[in-house]
Amino acid sequence: MAPLSPASEKAIARLREYKPPPTNYHSVPLSRRAAVLLLLYADPDGDLKTVLTIRAKTLSSFAGHAAFPGGKADSDQETAFETARREASEETGLPNIGEPLFPPFWIEHLCELPANLARNELVVRPCVALLHSYNEKTGQSADPEVALIPRLDAKEVAAVFTARFHNFLKTSDESCLDDVERQQSGDWYRGSWTTWHESDWRSIPPPPHSLLHHFYVPTSEKSVTKPKPTSSQSQNQKAAISELEERERSGELTRYKVFGMTARILVDAARLAYHEEPEFEHNSHFGDEEMIAKLQRIGRLGALKRPDDELTRETMQKAAKLS
């Protein structure tokens, strides 16, 4: 695997140097905390790609959606990075903190981004990391997409796929070397303004009001991994995996849709990394720290989390009126 390109080196340096503002993540109850891992790595040209998952259809929340590896915090002592790495290990088999990776691989924690607010009233802390795959001293290199084959938990993940990080600032597909991706046509980006958090957000179609930018990531055999069949998988899990594979084989599904909070985090992270504004309209602020604080002031985001918790326009209007 090639070393980082000059543009990628600068992007990683900016993320490494980024210092997020004070966060409300630690002030909300444990039941409201979650963290996700935005894992970057270099492709053969040294350009950055990121790792995403398709959530299993059998999950109770956001089933079938594209998402980062991640999940809820386990204890008050667990840091956001520890939560994100633990969940990524459980979902995809990526070695957890303290577990070895064979050379030349190692994971560098770069930064945390401002907390985001999910519709189900979880406060989500994005954690950005770089998977190093090139050793400058020895010249040893490896391709993560070949050498690190994910071991997926079918109860949580239907597929793992990769996407070009810089492309989340663009309105169309960037050029690529993958013949399969090059041959696939279709829209990369769509969006329109809607209302959420009592401010304008980029979303299509309205309603609902929680959707953000919509990106359509090309799929190929190299960039997508699915759980291998096992005796422990339920019939529903096996059927969901088979359905996804059949849709891809038939040509019905050639792109995975990335939208909502996941898309917004990608846009924010790419803006920071490349010091570049997107080609599409977007929000100027990063994360939802201000709204999280206001919701706490009106008594939301309490310790008791109910299955039907969901932020409504009325709740957001009430919080937005606070100065």
Image: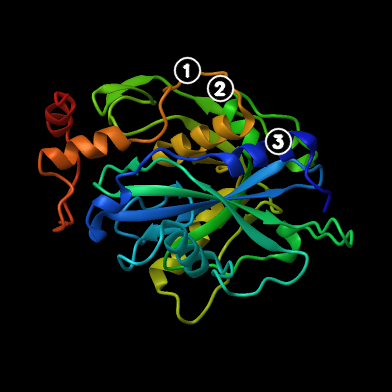
- Residue 50 or 17: which is nearer the viewer? 17
Q: What residue type is labelled 1?
A: Glu
Q: Is residue 262 left or right of residue 272?
A: left
Residue annotated with mark 1: 281
Instruction: Tell me the quarter of the picture where residue 72 sits.
Output: bottom left
Q: Is mark 1 on a helix, strand or loop?
A: loop
Instruction: Tell me the quarter of the picture where residue 226 sits.
Output: bottom right
Q: As displayed, is residue 75 above or below residue 178?
A: below
Count of number-bearing discs: 3
- Residue 312 or 46: which is nearer the viewer? 46
Q: Residues within 10 Å of mark 1 (few under 14, many from 20)?
A: few
Q: As displayed, is residue 72 above or below residue 173?
A: below
Q: Residue furthest right?
A: 139
Q: As displayed, is residue 91 above or below residue 112?
A: below
Label of residue 278 in the image: 2
Marks 2/3: CA distance? 18 Å
Q: Nearer the viewer, mark 1 or mark 3?
A: 3
Can the viewer see residue 187 in this picture?
no
Q: Which amino acid does label 2 sit on?
A: Pro
Q: Is mark 2 on a helix, strand or loop?
A: loop
Residue annotated with mark 3: 10
Marks 1/3: CA distance? 24 Å
Q: In which quarter of the image is the C terminus?
A: top left
Q: Earlier in the sequence, mark 2 or mark 3?
A: 3
Q: Which amino acid does label 3 sit on?
A: Lys
